[in-house]
Image (cartoon, rainbow, N blue to C red):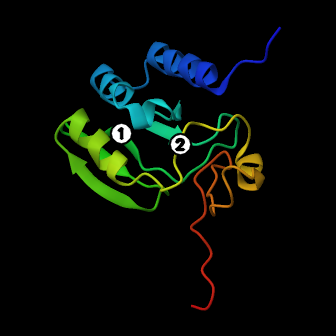
């Protein structure tokens, strides 16, 4: 039997995200309709919709994410938990804010882990942040 292609893995995950019910339907559909996001691997937190450039945990943490805002609308954060992009009145606006901030090297999700993505000769190094099972630490900066 052939190994699943990356596109198939990503599509299956989109279906799982839709079925798990953690993300508002409006947000799910707006993100799914955007081709640049639909090629990425989606994952959820409590109401949050995240996107990874790879299909295996620990997923990349270099793309902003979106969650419902208290009082309505959405809030775009990230890519790291301590970074904020701002409010969006609609899901489409939130998706547009994420697309504007996609990494330059962002393409179809890589089949594998962030570490494998880093060393893949076709993708090259990109200083990925990864989700270690909890909020990521801020990047370390040299020189101060």
The residue most toward the bottom is 143
10 Å neighbourhood of mark 1: few (<14), some, or many (≥20)? many
Q: Quadrant of residue 119?
A: bottom right
- Residue 61 in picture, x, y percent from top left: 56, 51
Q: On residue 8, which mark appears?
A: none
The residue most toward the right is 1
Mark 2 = which residue? 107
In the rendered structure, the answer to whether residue 58 lies left or right of residue 85 reads right
Residue 56 higher or lower than 24, as above or below: below
Residue that appears at 64% across and 43% down: 59
- Residue 8 in picture, x, y percent from top left: 61, 18
Mark 1 = which residue? 67
Q: Could you tell me which secondary element the residue under label 2 belongs to?
A: loop
- Residue 77 in picture, x, y percent from top left: 38, 52
Q: Quadrant of residue 11?
A: top right
Query: Is residue 69 visible in the rendered structure shown here?
Result: no
Q: Earlier in the sequence, mark 1 or mark 2?
A: 1
Residue that appears at 35% across and 47% down: 98
Query: Is residue 109 visible in the rendered structure shown here?
Result: yes
- The quarter of the image holding the C terminus is bottom right
10 Å neighbourhood of mark 2: few (<14), some, or many (≥20)? some
- The quarter of the image holding the N terminus is top right
Closer to the camera: disc 1 or disc 2?
2
């Amino acid at each position: 039997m052939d190994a699943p292609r990356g596109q198939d893995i990503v599509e299956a995950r989109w279906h799982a995200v839709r079925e798990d019910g953690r993300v508002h339907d409006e947000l799910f559909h707006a993100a799914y309709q955007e081709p640049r996001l639909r090629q990425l691997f989606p994952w959820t937190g409590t109401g949050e919709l995240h996107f990874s450039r790879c299909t295996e945990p620990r997923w990349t943490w270099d793309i902003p994410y979106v969650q419902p805002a208290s009082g309505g609308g959405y809030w775009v954060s990230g890519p790291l938990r301590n970074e904020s992009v701002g409010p969006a009145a609609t899901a489409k606006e939130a998706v547009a804010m994420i697309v504007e901030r996609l990494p330059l090297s962002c393409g179809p999700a890589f089949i594998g882990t962030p570490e494998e993505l880093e060393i893949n000769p076709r993708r090259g190094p990109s200083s990925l942040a990864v989700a270690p099972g909890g909020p990521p630490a801020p990047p370390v900066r040299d020189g101060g």
